[in-house]
Image (cartoon, grey):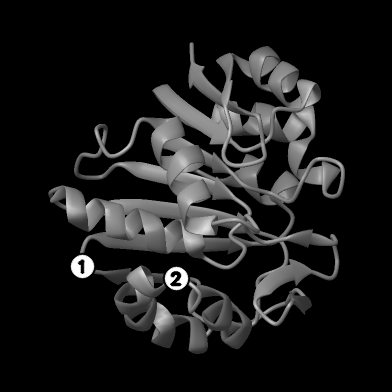
Amino acid sequence: MNGQSSVVDWRDGQVPVSARFDDPYYSLENGLAETRHVFHAGNGLPQRLVDGFHIAELGFGTGLNLLATLALWRQAGAPGTLRFTTFEAFPLAAEDMLRAQSAFAELAEIAAELAPHWRAGARRFAVPGLAFEMIAGDARQTLPAWQGQADAWFLDGFSPAKNPELWEPALLAAVAAHTAPGGTAATYSAAGGVRRALAEAGFTVERVPGYGRKRHMTVARMR
């Protein structure tokens, strides 16, 4: 893909780890199950899906959340088009992304459908049921300038300890400012600073059971 790419180390030849942030791109136990628990269930999906439903994401990573959510959309038989906007400072190279996605056999068909777009360096494209856009660059600059509003947020940056920039109160306030009335957000992080920043930004925040070894995670709804 075009732009400044992230460097990947492959743990045990299988798990992609960011060399920049020294953090895995997805759960070492089961990345797909974690996506479903944290971002789908945490945002009340698929029950809320309607034509034009808009998901926004901080931290695109391997694209796993996108693949899993498009699969969920299609399985739910939702009408029309899902809108998915992601903010990513350091996009993965296409072949690293595809190698990471190959770990999830049940998403292989969707991964193959989208692969030509990654290889072409596309930042915006449409396929049946999906309108996708990646906004590359530092979200602290790109999100405040964004004109959209999300119905649900996937807050999926690397851990606050490794990647504090994506969890700053000012950025989470920008998330709130770009959330539709009644919109939601979910993250695997249960860090007190993250929960406080979301609450101060206008969300009602709840700590709920996390996935796997993570005892807790955070869900939030715009007041």
Q: Are marks 2 and 1 in contact (CB under 8 Å)?
A: no
Q: How many neighbours does mark 2 have within 10 angstroms: few (below 14), some (14-19), or many (20 or more)?
A: some
Q: Of the residues under marks 2 and 1, which one precedes in the sequence?
A: 2
- Does any portion of residue 106 appear in the rendered image? yes
Q: Mark 2 to mark 1: distance in Å?
A: 21 Å
Q: Quadrant of the N terminus?
A: bottom right
Task: Report helix, strand or loop for mark 1.
Answer: loop
Residue type marked 2:
Phe
Residue type marked 1:
Pro
Task: Report helix, strand or loop for mark 2.
Answer: loop
* Between marks 2 and 1 in the image, the one whose residue lies nearer the viewer: 2
Residue 195 position within the rendered picture, expressed as x and y whole percent measured from the top left: 70, 21
Q: Which mark is residue 128?
A: 1
Residue 55 position within the rendered picture, expressed as x and y whole percent measured from the top left: 42, 44
Relative height, residue 122 to residue 178 (above, below): below
- Does any portion of residue 149 appear in the rendered image? no
- Left or right for 48, reference 10: left
For the residue pair 163 and 41, the one nearer the viewer reads as: 41
Residue 53 position within the rendered picture, expressed as x and y whole percent measured from the top left: 30, 41
Q: Which mark is residue 177?
A: none
> Which residue is denoted by mark 2 in the rendering?
104
